[in-house]
């Protein structure tokens, strides 16, 4: 089965083109099940789309009417993290809720652009469907691939040779500039490793980590009597040096995580959750004992912290 996908000018052409490909053939062996599920999903999206449209109508919700694609960028990032957290916790109800929230924001952005006459939600969905078919010729065409790595190479070749995407001058240009620093560092390192710029031996990354920690310690003349608040309020070249060395250390820690197949963002998210649970236990315990949360009661807070820690492993 060979499906040739061209670029349609609008959603109507896209629908006609996709329908002409015979959905039953696209669905494959489980066509009956997939098409029945697609019909149910289409009805649900129709209902969802009407709700979103109503919120953006002239007599719709004042808050929704006030929003623009730019104003909800932060919401999109926040909801993506919340979905990632729900997945980490393997909480089905939470995953369902957060997936819906992301659908809402994506549809809202598309509908805003539709209202501005830039493109429609249907345009976006049809373009994505065509792209998926075009970039999976091993499923919808005659190409044969045997491994995930071959799929990725084929995907990139189609982007450049079929779609005419300009080849990046540097492999690092494929990493989006707007990514948060932690995610960007991780992806930069993954890209560099793909062309062989990587550790030769496992111990090398740990030697580098020790080296960066040593340079960080040298960047500040640590004094045992110095208070952390004094260090934090320091200014000038010494603080610039500290900032640079902290960055180098963090970059190396992220690289170590990558070496072991650990996504540092997910790992840090888990630790954030663990810290929050333990700290809340400390707060609740101190409140029950009628004790203030301050440095003078650090011994008690530390004891409650350890209590929470033991409770997690019991």
Image (spheres, grey):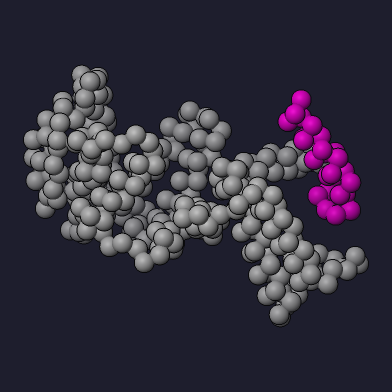
Q: Quadrant of residue 263?
A: top right
Majority secondary structure in the magenta region: helix
- The range drawn in magenta is 287-314
Tell which of 213 and 142 is nearer to you. Answer: 142
Magenta span contains residue 300: yes
Left or right position of 15 against 235: left
Q: Can you name the residue that lies furthest to the front here? A: 200
Position of residue 75 measured from the top left corner of the image (x, y, whole percent): 44, 52
Position of residue 136 measured from the top left corner of the image (x, y, whole percent): 26, 39
Q: Quadrant of residue 118?
A: bottom left
Q: Quadrant of residue 17?
A: top left
Tell which of 236 and 67 is nearer to you. Answer: 236
Q: Can you name the residue that lies furthest to the right here? A: 225
Tell which of 88 and 257 is nearer to you. Answer: 257
The answer to whether 12 is drawn above or below residue 223 in the figure is: above
Position of residue 209 measured from the top left corner of the image (x, y, whole percent): 70, 56
Image quadrant for the N terminus?
top left
Q: Can you name the residue that lies furthest to the bottom here? A: 236
Residue lying at 8% horizontally and 35% vertically, measured from the top left:
20
Residue lying at 90% horizontally and 65% vertically, measured from the top left:
224
Q: Is residue 99 visible?
A: yes
Image quadrant for the C terminus?
top right
């Amino acid at each position: 089965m060979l499906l040739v996908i061209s670029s349609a000018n609008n959603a109507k052409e896209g629908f006609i083109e996709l329908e002409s490909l015979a959905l039953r053939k696209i669905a494959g062996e489980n066509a009956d099940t997939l098409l029945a599920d697609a019909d149910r999903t289409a009805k649900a999206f129709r209902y969802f789309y009407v709700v979103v449209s109503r919120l953006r109508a002239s007599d719709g919700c004042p808050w929704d009417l006030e929003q623009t694609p730019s104003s909800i960028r932060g919401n999109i990032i926040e909801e993506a993290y919340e979905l990632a957290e729900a997945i980490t916790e393997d909480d089905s109800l939470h995953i369902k809720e957060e997936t819906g929230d992301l659908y809402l924001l994506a549809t809202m952005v598309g509908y805003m652009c539709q209202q501005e006459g830039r493109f429609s939600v249907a345009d976006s969905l049809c373009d994505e469907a065509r792209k998926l078919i075009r970039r999976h010729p091993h499923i919808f065409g005659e190409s044969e691939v045997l491994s995930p790595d071959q799929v990725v190479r084929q995907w990139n070749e189609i982007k450049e040779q079929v779609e005419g995407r300009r080849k990046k001058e540097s492999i690092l240009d494929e990493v989006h500039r707007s990514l948060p620093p932690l995610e960007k560092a991780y992806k930069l390192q993954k890209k560099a490793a793909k062309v062989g710029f990587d550790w030769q031996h496992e111990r090398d990354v740990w030697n580098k980590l020790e080296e960066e920690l040593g340079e960080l310690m040298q960047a500040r003349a640590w004094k045992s009597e110095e208070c952390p608040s004094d260090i934090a309020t320091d200014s000038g070249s010494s603080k610039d040096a500290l900032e640079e060395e902290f960055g180098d250390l963090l970059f190396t820690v992220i690289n170590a995580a990558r070496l072991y197949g650990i996504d540092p963002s997910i790992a840090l998210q888990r630790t954030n959750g663990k810290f929050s649970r333990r700290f809340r236990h400390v707060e609740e315990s101190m409140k029950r004992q009628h004790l203030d949360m301050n440095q003078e009661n650090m011994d008690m807070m530390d004891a409650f912290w350890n209590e929470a820690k033991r409770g997690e492993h019991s």
